[in-house]
Amino acid sequence: MHAIEKILAKASGKDRVTTGEIVNAKVDFAEINDLYLQTVYSFREMGGKKVWDPDRVAFVFDHYAPAPTIKSAKIHQEMRAFARENNLTYHFDINCGVCHQVMPERGLIYPGMIIVATDSHTTTHGAFGAFGTGVGATDMATVLISGELWFRVPEIIEVRIEGTPPKGVYPKDVILHILGQIKADGAVYKAIDFTGSYVEQLDVAGRMTICNMAVEMGAKTAYMQPNQKVLDYVAKRAVRPFEVQYTDDDFAYSESYVFDVSALSPQVAVPHSVDHVRPLETVEKVRVDQGFIGSCTGGREEDIAVAAQILKGKKLPPYVRLVVIPASTEVMQVCLEKGYLQTLIEAGATLSTPGCGPCLGAHEGVLAPGEVCITASNRNFPGRMGSTEAEIYLASPATVAASVLNGYLTDPRTLL
Amino acid sequence: MQKTIIGQAIVLGDNIDTDQIYPGRYLELVDPKEIGRHCLAGVDPEIAPNFKPGDIVVAGKNFGCGSSREHAAIALINMGASLVLAESFARIFFRNAINLGLPLVICPGISQKVKAGQTLEVDLEQGTVKIQETGEILAGEKLGEQAAKILAAGGIKPLFRAKMGVKE
Ligand code: SF4
């Protein structure tokens, strides 16, 4: 069996499971973000009184943190009331950050667990050897009542990544490249296991970036076998004992892809699809109005550090903006201590509260018609960051920093 | 569950994501009727005001990809869509729609075969689609057992209410 199958089998009280089988699995943690007040409504409609386990449910206020409108303030208000009523052990209000960053930091994510969240990027937690998947509000309400959810045991695709990328090429470039090949529907309903020498040595932040974007290929979940860096990270934080699962040697993947990243160059996804990916050097000189470094894909310490490295002692040109939003308060504090944020502010960047920011066009830096944005986040669908007539290019934080510095799409290797 | 659905088609392309079905700027709305008015606003804001209740949404590959926002399914239902036919669906959208009682049928090739405004007769049990104008019958996929069970109950909520012993 694959590690993912072992996680599902264990959670559903079985010795083994097979592809296609429907299992009812116990959920280890359920997270609801502030777009999903509907969860509370569905919970009540279905006769829910108290959540099944107050230690295993949390709200994270990230999409509307802090509340930009009266309507979103009321959403927070109703969610806080629900959290209080249910005596939830964990509550992450507007002072915390993006759910997928906050949960691992607080030790709620660890190998071998099942995490469901009302957010498609829950695949991020495959970085820790966990089974993470996104659900809608009503599925989540059934979890809050019963502590369980039905899953179809997925086909598992292997994406083997070999080699060490050249300087100036980052995990974001690697996943964009893969996405460009496998395409936005290449893994629908399936799980992706990222393997290979590149993944084995990759740090926690890079693993999270790659697993995060697995959902852009339609994947139900992503997985990476935990390495020592992951085990060191969770050892300090995990709130519960855990068991790492391992894939059996004789496991057969439904499909396998192999990528060698030794000669990869910086990549961009051009408007308006995540899989319109091209090597940066083949893209014409595109003017940029705004850069964004942030989100659950590209707002970690490593992402902000490389931007600071590129922009140290420099100034953004007139009329070009850079919005920087650390993915969490912890990230913000570390970046403050290390001086990255001061460097970026001196270069002309705008700093905003940890949270999703303009990633989904809800607030803090949305785009006007005709504007061009280069972003370290994960989606460039029409209208994702504001106007449907804005253009969004996805790239690594280094490419974002280099591009705002010049005012047009720029290869960061020229500045490192 | 209604076994046969007849309605006129609107036809959309591939990879219609949830931001196009229900743009992020409307996410703070909670009234379902209001949500329905912005359905597919990211494709064309004129679709929802002109949509006739009972009509059918036809799309290409990977319909509903992107975020897990249940608003996408809520919007389709409240716009009056009786059914969505697509070449394939994204997973979370699929679950959300079935949970809320919106039938979906996977039908390879559908977005090329059907023209906007044609009348379709869809047999949900068999997964077949008949284009009334041409008489052509397309073979879609039957729903999986779990999905069919939820849909037959009218969605996951009635199913759960029964389980919890909640009186209507
Ligand atoms: S940062 Fe963006 S992708 Fe991540 S959870 Fe927030 S809105 Fe979604």
Image (tube, helix red, strand yellow):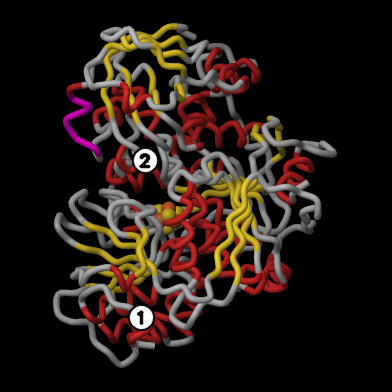
Q: Residue at x 64, y 41 (%)?
A: A155
Image disc number at residue B15: 2
Counting other residues with Cα less than 10 Å from the Cα at mark 1, is it few (<14), some (14-19), or many (20 or more)? many
* Residues at discs 1 and 2 both on one chain: no
User: SS at mark 2?
Assistant: loop
The x and y percentages for residue B16 are 34, 38
Is B92 within the magenta? no
Q: Is residue A84 among what the camera can see?
A: yes
Quadrant for residue B78, please give it: top left
The x and y percentages for residue A286 are 20, 69
Quadrant for residue B148, please give it: top right
Task: State how far apart marks 1 and 2 are (Cα).
Answer: 31 Å
Q: Residue at x 38, y 28 (%)?
A: B74
Q: Is residue A64 left or right of residue B168?
A: left
Image disc number at residue A412: 1
Label 1: chain letter: A
- Residues marked 1 and 2 touching at CB (< 8 Å): no
The x and y percentages for residue A299 are 44, 68
Residue range of the region highlighted in magenta in the rendering: B43-49
Is B48 within the magenta? yes
Q: Residue at x 27, y 68 (%)?
A: A283
User: SS at mark 1?
Assistant: helix
Q: Quadrant of ligand 1?
A: bottom left
Q: Is residue A305 left or right of residue A142?
A: left
Disc 1 marks which amino acid? Pro
Q: Is residue A106 left or right of residue A63?
A: right
The x and y percentages for residue B133 are 26, 8
Q: Which of A322/A414 is in front? A: A414
